[in-house]
Image (cartoon, rainbow, N blue to C red):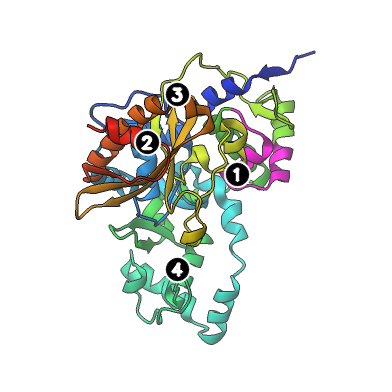
Amino acid sequence: MQTTRRLRPDQVRRIAVRAAGLDRARPDRVDVRHLRRVVDDLDVVQLDSVNVVDRAHRLVFYSRLGVHDVDALDQWLWRSRDLHECWAHVASLMPTSAWPLLAHRRADATVPWKSVQRISRERPDFLADVLAQVRERGPLTVSDLEGGGDRTSGFWGWNPGRTALQWLFESGQLAIDHRDRTFRAAYDLPERVLGEVVHEPDVPQDEAVRALVLRAIAAQGVGTAADLADTHRLGVRETRTALAHLVSEGVVDAVHVDGWGEPAYALPDLVVPRRVEARALVAPFDPLVWFRPRVERVFGMHYRIEIYVPADRREYGYYVLPFVLGDQLVARVDLKAHRRRGVLEVRGAWAQPVAVGERDRVGAHLAIELATLGRHLGTPEVEVADHGDLTGPVRHWLP
């Protein structure tokens, strides 16, 4: 009878940091091989329009590669066709080869949203007209559409044109060709964006879920069913069913992590690093910190993004990045990039309890990372406010 493998929390931390690709030495010169390796490690890169420091997907690559040419990155992301935009972990980029695995996700979206149903009642030919415009003139942004309608009230301000384009995209009738410098999406026909992969047979949902769970395990190293489900936003119940199947086939191992109250899972060839050398600021939308229960369980950090919290109720700040050092999340930093002034503003910096006795050492490493991020963003002057117990050490060690 096979004995269940036992792992200690410190081992899981090292596994998680390595699986996320954060402990590799940053290359002196970044090329497409390094960009591909980041996606190979993570499988999914989340997109988000918030640009307080930089776009979320750009920060994911910065955390692993350091200073690099962001124009070359954008060119590869949107023009190489190695990746495609999809609804995976919300709006995300995944390898284009994964298109058949997400057929069930697109099928889930084929029932029109209430807003789409309303548009169809009021303008019966509108969806067909949008498709025809894209077919004849694509790729098109919302502003390129004829008859797209006025911007609506509310936070998102979607007009009928944007609603139609987004629903046609999520249901697989359109694809996103690229995003411009302002993050606007341009839509086109899937076969013109993705090529022959759109004609490959759809993978049945149960097989697709098992494949996605395997990809999630590779990306996390070790995870519970809920951890793994979150990577591609699968249901926890269907993830457990997939894991039971994969364990019975010997493709996945169930493991015990000391202190965890539920089973965890890993690949049979899992290697536990003796040491990891990581130093990186990670965005709120980085895969390492996506699933907040996992962040707290693995790294002991209670982490929440406070963008939508009123300013007077925020505990740490608007856009707070955790700081990885070794195998720990040792600090968090509230940042804002002022590109016109060339300034990276450190609005606050706080040591985690695990690093309270090492504030000077952590501050020195954080200062190096902030200076590097400043160079990368074109904001080489780092200004540090007096907010948080790490701001003094950071200011002291800044070059």
Element assignment for label 4: helix
Q: Earlier in the sequence, mark 2 or mark 4?
A: 2
- Which residue carries the number 3 mark? 326
Instruction: Decide which of tag 2 and tag 3 comes sooner along the chain.
Output: 2
The residue at the point 31 percent across, 37 percent down is 370
- Horizontal side of 129 relative to 122 (left or right) equals left
Q: Where on the picture, by quarter, is residue 318?
A: bottom left
Residue type marked 2: Ser
Residue appearing at x 40%, y 73% in the figure: 132
| Camera-side mark, 3 or 1 | 3
Rendering quarter of residue 2: top right
Label 2 vs label 3, nearer the camera: 3
Q: Is residue 217 above or below residue 124?
A: above
- Could you say where residue 369 lies in the image, as x and y percent from the top left? 32, 33
The residue where tag 4 is placed is 165
| Magenta extent | 222-242
Query: Which residue is denoted by mark 2 in the rendering?
Result: 63
| Mark 1, residue position | 230
Q: Distance of mark 2 from mark 4, alpha carbons? A: 32 Å
Closest to the observer: 190 or 348? 348
